[in-house]
Amino acid sequence: MTRDTILEVRNLSTTFARAGRALPAVRDVSFTLGRGEVLGLVGESGSGKSVTLRSILGLSRHYGTVTGEVRWKGRDIASLSERALRSVRGREIAMIFQEPMSSLNPLLTVGMQLTEVLKAHTDLGRSERRRRAIEMLDHVGIPSAAARLDDYPHQFSGGMRQRVMIAIALAARPQLLLADEPTTALDVTIQAQILDLILGLAREYEMGVILVTHDLGVVAQTCDRVAVMYAGRIVEEAPVAPLLSDPRHPYTMGLMRSVPEGVAPRTALYSVPGTPPALDALPQGCAFAPRCPSASAQCTATDPALNRLAPGRSAACHHPVSLAKGDAA
């Protein structure tokens, strides 16, 4: 089914500065998102996933330089002033941050934090805001929602705090949700509940979702498409089933091999050799070449473009066919 495109990111780059040196955290990232679609951003820590989300919402430009376009429903919001962008954040595009305890204000009740969002982004009156806040807490599975409205974040468990964060993010009924590892540090049962909740609300509101995760199991369960990031770039993009069954980039293949499935007891688990490059020490050519078992002289000399391999599939690799299928390049 073809979905209406609501978000188009074009050549997004984010650079930070340290001691007079430019540190490229996101490099020339482009992708689209349809209404009701769930896109997974996958990669190791430091690959640029979270910075990409913050750059879309204009949060990275407070401490870095952001270039490129972020076209939201046809309008480039990356060029908006901070004042104009505030009308988009929360109302049209919302974000769930990684750690709810550091995102929620410990000095304010969850009810105050919920109604604050509704006051800023809706025309609801005071009593209506309280009613909507109770409704949202109930909607995300907080028992006795009306009674918990006056509780503080420390009075909730980790899973319940994450549900509160989701309630705050969705209170103004946004059309796009940016979820930055929303299940980090939660046990498997709570993780499944949170993901089911996000997907259910996405279907109910026809809301697009960009889900940042390092867990390919989560990707398989939740996403329609996947973009794999490495060293600030998208190195492979495809629908979830083809990517997981037939990865075309060696980094994606390494991530797949790192998932412990059918491993005999007392067998060493696989990990991708080496470590991701530091932002101030990106290698010449392909950034993954120093860790790639099939790197050639071409790989160390030239950074490959993100090329279309098939409808809906692309990879930034000089030898994608040989790596995926064992054929000659």
Image (cartoon, grey):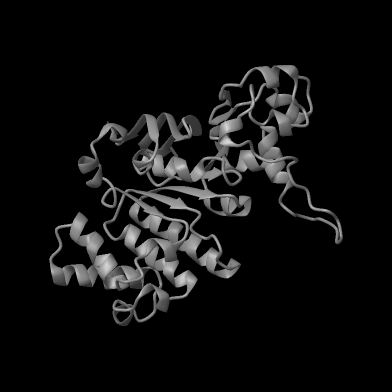
- Please determine whether, in this image, residue 128 is positioned above or below residue 38: below
Q: Position of residue 195 (x, y in %)?
A: 50, 60
Residue 74 seen in render: no
Give coordinates of residue 108: x percent, y percent.
29, 71
Q: Left or right: where does residue 57 sit relative to residue 294?
A: left
Name the foreground residue: 289 vs 75.
289
In the image: residue 290, left or right of residue 268: left
Nearest the eye: 277 or 98: 277
In the image shown, does 296 or 281 lie closer to the viewer? 281
The residue under the point 48% across, 70% down is: 159
Quarter of the image containing the N terminus?
Answer: top left
Task: Quadrant for residue 37, please give it.
Answer: top left
Above or below, 75 against 260 in this view is: above
* Residue at the (39%, 33%) spot, across then down: 65
Q: Is residue 167 left or right of residue 120?
A: right
Quadrant containing the C terminus is top right
Where is residue 303? Give x, y as percent.
61, 21
> What's the residue at 67%, 36% (across, down)?
251
At horizontal 42% and vertical 31% (from top left) the residue drawn is: 12
Q: In this rendering, does residue 155 appear at all?
A: yes
Residue 75 pos. (x, y %): 27, 32
| Tally of marks | 0
Residue sitting farthest toward the front: 19
Quarter occupied by residue 162: bottom left
Is residue 304 toward the left or the right of residue 289 in the image?
Answer: left
Q: Against 117, is 243 above or below? A: above
